[in-house]
Image (cartoon, rainbow, N blue to C red):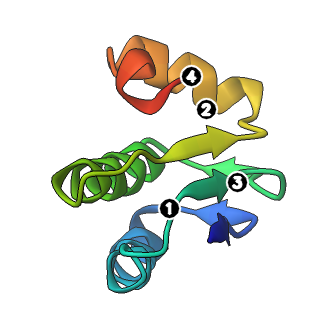
Amino acid sequence: MSFLLPKTVTQETALQLQKEGLLNAPQLRVVNCALLEDFDSTVLTVLLAWQKKAQADGHSLSVEQAPEKLKVLANVYGVSALLGL
């Protein structure tokens, strides 16, 4: 199952988004970031929570079409490798 992140992921929307992804965790394999434009570092929290759940369930989660800003943020926070960015 692929999950398409919305255009905006900020502190105000991250918790609900994280919960939504965790509810679908058994099927979640790919996170598509093609629409992602307006976001802050909380998007990393969401992705890391999903990645942790995927690993606990014995499968991997891949992040596709990550914008450059997301890659830079992941690098700054030291989580690029964890997210495959």
- Which of the marked residues, 2 or 4, is nearer the chain's N terminus? 2
The residue where tag 1 is placed is 10
Amino acid type of the residue tagged 3 in the rendering? Asp
- Which of the marked residues, 1 or 2, is nearer the chain's N terminus? 1
* Position of residue 85 in the picture relative to residue 23 (left or right): right
- Which of the marked residues, 3 or 4, is nearer the chain's N terminus? 3
- Which of the marked residues, 3 or 2, is nearer the chain's N terminus? 3
The residue where tag 3 is placed is 38
The residue where tag 4 is placed is 85
The residue where tag 2 is placed is 70
- Residue 6 pos. (x, y %): 70, 70
Task: Tell me the mark number nearer the camera, choosing from 3 and 4.
Answer: 4
The 10 Å Cα crowd at callout 4, few under 14, some 14 to 19, many 20 or more, is some
Residue at figure coordinates x 39%, y 83% from the top left: 16
Q: What whole-number distance in Å separates the C-alpha atoms at marks 2 and 4?
A: 9 Å
- Which of the marked residues, 1 or 3, is nearer the chain's N terminus? 1
Amino acid type of the residue tagged 4 in the rendering? Leu
Task: Tell me the mark number nearer the camera, choosing from 4 and 1.
Answer: 4
